[in-house]
Image: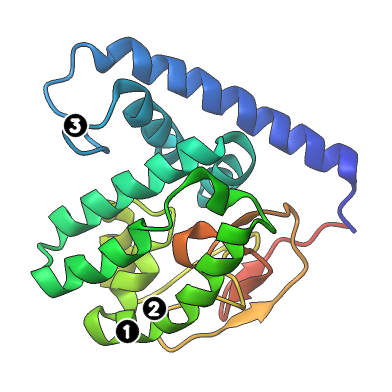
């Protein structure tokens, strides 16, 4: 079983790297012509925080950082930036943008407070939203939208027709499953416990996409 002292050391290391990266991005933000993660119009702090998360070396570290190190306000901005990039990168049409905008209505800090009324309402709405989204987007697009992969990483995974190769911690939510390639999210013992999976990254990461090799801890 995974013990709490080891978990605390992992999270402390991620936290140190995360804030060092935030400060690094803030120090160069005054000199950037355009953000290379966030859209034009996002504040320097929003851009720095989002870039710092996505610059962490592993997907597990990015997921843990989003869950444990970002404030509810920062989570809203992170998701807003990710939506804007998704619209730009995939050149979405008006109907697709409208579907995404329906989710933006829930992007208020309260939604990232587990058990809050808005959190509950969002999860209820998501049940019907996901059905509509599956008709407007491919499985791969939805998997990318609610992942911590960069566009380059997403394209590399797609071109190799593989997913989650190697050892990984829990990377999906059984209640909001975005495993692509016809795979399902299977319940697994998680090393790091986070709420950063599924639609809006609201759901408990409690499983692994089929074919992923879990981390084994004695």
- Residue 132, labelled with which disc? 1
Above or below — where is 169 with respect to 13?
below
From the viewer's perspective, is 39 left or right of 52?
Answer: left
Q: Are marks 3 and 1 in contact (CB under 8 Å)?
A: no
The residue singled out by tag 2 in the image is 129
Q: Residue at left 31%, top 79%?
A: 133
| Quarter occupied by the C terminus | bottom right
Above or below — where is 155 with respect to 75?
below
Secondary structure at badge 2 equals: helix
| Quarter occupied by the N terminus | bottom right
Disc 3 or 1, which lies upstream in sequence?
3
Q: Residue at left 60%, top 35%?
A: 69
Q: Residue at left 78%, top 33%?
A: 9
Q: Quadrant of residue 61?
A: top right
Q: Residue at left 10%, top 69%?
A: 94
Q: Give 113 or 193, whichever is nearer the viewer.
A: 113
- Residue 41, labelled with which disc? 3
Rounded to the nearest angstrom, the CA distance separating label 3 from label 1 is 29 Å
Q: Are marks 2 and 3 in contact (CB under 8 Å)?
A: no
Disc 2 or 3, which lies upstream in sequence?
3
Image x and y of residue 194, in percent: 67, 54
Residue 99 visible: yes
Secondary structure at badge 3 equals: loop
From the viewer's perspective, is 183 left or right of 101?
Answer: right
Q: Are marks 2 and 1 in contact (CB under 8 Å)?
A: yes
Q: Quadrant of residue 78?
A: top left
Image x and y of residue 128, in percent: 43, 83
Rounded to the nearest angstrom, the CA distance separating label 2 from label 1 is 5 Å
Q: Farthest residue to the front: give it.
A: 117
Badge 2: few (under 14), some or many (20 or more) residues near its Cα, within 10 Å?
Answer: some
Q: Give 100 or 195, whichever is nearer the viewer.
A: 100
């Amino acid at each position: 079983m995974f013990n709490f002292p080891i978990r605390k050391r992992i999270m402390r290391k991620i936290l140190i790297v995360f804030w060092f990266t935030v400060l690094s991005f803030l120090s160069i933000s005054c000199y950037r012509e355009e953000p290379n993660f966030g859209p034009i119009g996002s504040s320097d702090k929003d851009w720095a925080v989002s870039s710092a998360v996505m610059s962490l070396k592993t997907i597990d570290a990015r997921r843990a950082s989003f869950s444990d190190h970002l404030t509810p306000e920062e989570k809203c901005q992170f998701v807003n930036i990710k939506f804007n990039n998704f619209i730009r990168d995939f050149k979405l049409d008006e109907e697709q943008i409208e579907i995404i905008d329906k989710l933006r209505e829930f992007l208020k800090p309260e939604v990232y407070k587990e058990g809050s009324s808005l959190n509950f309402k969002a999860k209820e709405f998501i049940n019907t939203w996901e059905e509509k989204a599956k008709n407007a987007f491919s499985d791969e697009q939805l998997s990318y939208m609610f992942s911590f992969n960069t566009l380059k990483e997403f394209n590399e995974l797609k071109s190799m027709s593989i997913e989650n190769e190697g050892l990984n911690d829990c990377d999906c939510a059984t209640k909001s499953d975005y495993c692509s390639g016809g795979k399902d999210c299977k319940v697994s013992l998680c090393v790091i416990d986070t709420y950063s999976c599924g639609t809006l990254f609201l759901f408990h990461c409690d499983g692994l996409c089929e074919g992923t090799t879990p981390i084994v801890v004695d």
